[in-house]
Image (cartoon, coloured by chain):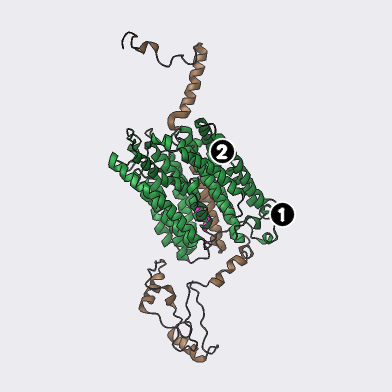
Chain colours: A green, B brown
């Protein structure tokens, strides 16, 4: 664990002491080296579940895929930001990369935390660098509003979580993940216990986001610069899913009744946000709403609490992280050339940037859950376990799958096919850097087809 | 590299006295004040190649002071850290014009190519290939592959012996102790 954490912390002095010509190169090289070391977490020699155990941090098959995804994402964010940061003064570039690295440190500590209060503190700590990235380096005036929505939605959800965790510590004496899964069932018979249940879950439901509390997401994703969008879509949403999967183990048997409205809300959100995607004119907004749609399915899968539900949720989280981050990178390639996010402005790109069209095609197919990609496997497991719980959910999940396919194809056809608008004919060709970025998103996704046991967690 | 706007000289043209003043003080621009001791120390430190975070005490703009004592125009030019108008040409002229082999990393062709090589090597050859090999040779987690092989082996063995593949009873019926129907 420390094998990855110390190099990540030492990346901060590396960034500040590098000469300006080697800043981005060394940042990229060292963050890839850290990502390589992080793969060592995938070795689970013991059957106890928890490995790399330390007093404060440990890994288990649930947190390891998310940790590896976090570590893999840092070099990708550095690659993606290099161009639009090139015009800024060198110290501001260093500050930007430092914010990304500090996010990585907080995320590693969050996913690796063994104790719930530490997880809570790191969960909140990730808000600060993200807020700074959105409000300082976002490109439109709406970024301030976006930052406010992002910060206060998450804080409002997580303050009850703090109270709930303190109550839990008071009654059980321990908040360690290692022992809470072995607790005898808690005595949750009073009305107040229902509020306690809601307090535990609300923070994660807002973060995921659940459909009713999702308003912060389109704003934050759209207004953030590319690295902010990538880390938000790929990892920060999954903090909510991960937290929910950890805490739901001790919330039985209240969850059987109380999760009902949230499952319905999540499934309804899949359909509704998918429909909103069909009407979007802003490309980044479309991808943001598609994130809400996929995460709604993940939320429903977790609230079902079956082995297939958990497994499907985790697989979908990892696959969606890579896919959504890649789609934001593709949208950013459009934005860097046209300085507009309007889809209709940049149509017919297949004729102008044919190599990029290949990436658009691959990631559109991943988004609409094409077999044999893990996106489909996760969705299918969740849909199956929901059908097992109640046959009627098939109507909503089936409609959701259909609408997902529709808006993914709508996005692809609008941006890539059709007549080319005249301003587009003079845009800059694609850079090798952009192709490398796309490759590094796609190849892990393809490699995961061959070994899904890496990302299916501890349930199966 | 600090870029600074040139304040208008009094009268619009450089007078010979200004040039003489320039040579004597060693400062490049006429009307420039000599830097304070703090500025001099900081400029010396910056030569060591460290980028010291400036904690707000000495804003870099004051390195080159633009206010002149004998300026007829009363405007106090606010210096910026860098000149935005010159840098914004970056987006107008394609980088491919100067460097046909532009890879997207840097405007310096040597650094650009080096960064590309580092990115591809570390990203693909190191991370994906070596990492992928590591993952391929991970031990059999949860004994799944062993379980599959063992099941196939036992099926072959049972078929040869003519035994049923699996017994009807999960538990041995003789070991189950049932309460007699007479007891309550």
Q: In the image, is residue A88 part of the stretch drawn in magenta?
A: yes
The magenta region covers: A75-89
Q: Can you give x and y, in whole percent of width and height, for residue A148 in the image? A: 45, 58
Residues beneath discs 1 and 2 located on the same chain: yes
Disc number lying in front (1 or 2): 2
Question: What residue is drawn where x is 42% and y is 34%?
Answer: A256
Query: Does residue B110 appear in the picture of this structure?
Result: yes
Residue at label 2?
A396
Residue at the limit of the structure toward the right, as seen here: A419
Q: Which mark is residue B70?
A: none
* Residue B68 screen position, x and y as percent: 45, 85
- From this view, report whether residue A387 is shown above or below residue B102: above
Can you identify the residue that label 1 sits on?
A: A419
Query: What whole-number distance in Å separates the C-alpha atoms at marks 1 and 2?
Result: 35 Å
- The chain carrying label 2 is A
Of the residues under marks 1 and 2, which one precedes in the sequence?
2
Residue closest to the eye, A322 or A205:
A205
A435 or B27, nearer to the observer: A435
Where B179 sits versus A12, above or below?
above
Report x, y in % for residue A351.
69, 53
Asked whether residue A57 is drawn in magenta, I would say no
Q: Does residue A97 show up? A: no
């Amino acid at each position: 664990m420390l094998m990855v954490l110390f190099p990540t912390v030492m990346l901060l002095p590396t960034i500040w002491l590098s000469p300006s010509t080697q800043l981005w190169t060394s940042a990229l090289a060292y963050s890839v080296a850290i990502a390589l070391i992080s793969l060592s977490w995938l070795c689970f020699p013991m059957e106890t579940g928890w490995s790399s155990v330390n007093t404060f941090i440990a890994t288990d098959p649930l947190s390891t895929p998310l940790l590896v995804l976090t570590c893999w994402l840092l070099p990708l964010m550095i690659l993606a930001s290099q161009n639009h940061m090139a015009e800024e003064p060198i110290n501001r570039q260093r500050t930007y990369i430092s914010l990304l690295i500090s996010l990585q440190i907080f995320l590693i500590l969050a996913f690796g935390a063994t104790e719930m209060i530490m997880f809570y503190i790191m969960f909140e700590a990730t808000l600060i660098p993200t807020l700074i990235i959105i409000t300082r380096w976002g490109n439109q005036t709406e970024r301030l509003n976006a930052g406010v929505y992002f910060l206060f939605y998450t804080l409002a959800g997580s303050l009850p979580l703090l109270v709930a965790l303190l109550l839990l510590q008071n009654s059980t004496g321990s908040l360690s993940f290692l022992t809470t899964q072995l607790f005898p069932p808690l005595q949750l018979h009073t009305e107040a216990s229902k509020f306690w249940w809601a307090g535990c879950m609300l923070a994660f439901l807002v973060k995921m986001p659940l459909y009713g509390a999702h308003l912060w997401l389109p704003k934050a994703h759209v207004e953030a610069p590319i690295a902010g969008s990538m880390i938000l879509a790929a990892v920060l949403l999954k903090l909510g899913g991960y937290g929910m999967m950890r805490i739901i183990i001790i919330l039985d048997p209240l969850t059987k009744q109380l999760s009902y409205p949230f499952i319905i809300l999540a499934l309804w959100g899949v359909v509704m946000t998918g429909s909103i995607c069909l009407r979007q004119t802003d490309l980044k907004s479309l991808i943001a709403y598609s994130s809400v749609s996929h995460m709604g399915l993940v939320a429903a899968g977790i609230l079902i609490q079956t082995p297939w539900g958990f497994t499907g949720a985790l697989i979908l989280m990892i696959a969606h992280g890579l896919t959504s981050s890649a789609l934001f990178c593709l949208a950013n390639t459009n934005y860097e050339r046209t300085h507009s996010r309007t889809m209709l402005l940049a149509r017919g790109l297949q004729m102008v940037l044919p190599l990029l069209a290949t990436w658009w095609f691959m990631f559109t197919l991943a988004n609409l859950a094409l077999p044999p990609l893990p996106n489909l496997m996760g969705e299918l497991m969740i849909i199956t376990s929901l059908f097992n719980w109640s046959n009627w959910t098939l109507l909503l999940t089936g409609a959701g799958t259909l609408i997902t396919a529709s808006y993914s194809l709508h996005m692809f056809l609008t941006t890539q096919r059709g007549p080319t608008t005249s301003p587009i004919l003079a845009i800059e060709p694609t850079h090798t850097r952009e192709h490398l970025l796309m490759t590094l998103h796609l190849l892990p996704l393809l490699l995961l087809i061959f070994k899904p046991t890496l990302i299916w967690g501890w349930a199966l | 590299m600090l870029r600074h706007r040139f304040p208008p000289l009094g009268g619009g043209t450089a007078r010979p006295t200004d040039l003489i003043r320039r040579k004597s003080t060693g400062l490049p621009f006429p009307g420039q004040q000599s830097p304070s001791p703090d500025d001099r120390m900081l400029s010396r430190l910056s030569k060591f190649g460290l980028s010291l975070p400036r904690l707000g005490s000495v804003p870099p703009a004051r390195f080159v002071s633009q206010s002149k004592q004998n300026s007829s125009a009363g405007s106090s030019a606010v210096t910026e850290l860098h000149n935005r108008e010159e840098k914004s040409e970056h987006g107008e002229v394609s980088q491919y014009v100067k460097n046909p082999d532009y890879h997207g990393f840097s405007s310096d062709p040597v650094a650009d190519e080096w960064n590309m090589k580092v990115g591809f090597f570390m990203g693909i050859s190191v991370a994906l290939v070596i990492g992928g090999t590591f993952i391929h040779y991970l031990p059999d987690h949860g004994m799944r592959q062993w379980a599959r092989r063992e099941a196939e082996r036992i099926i072959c063995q049972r078929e040869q012996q003519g035994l049923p593949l699996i017994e009807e009873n999960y538990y041995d019926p003789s070991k189950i102790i049932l309460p007699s129907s007479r007891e309550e």
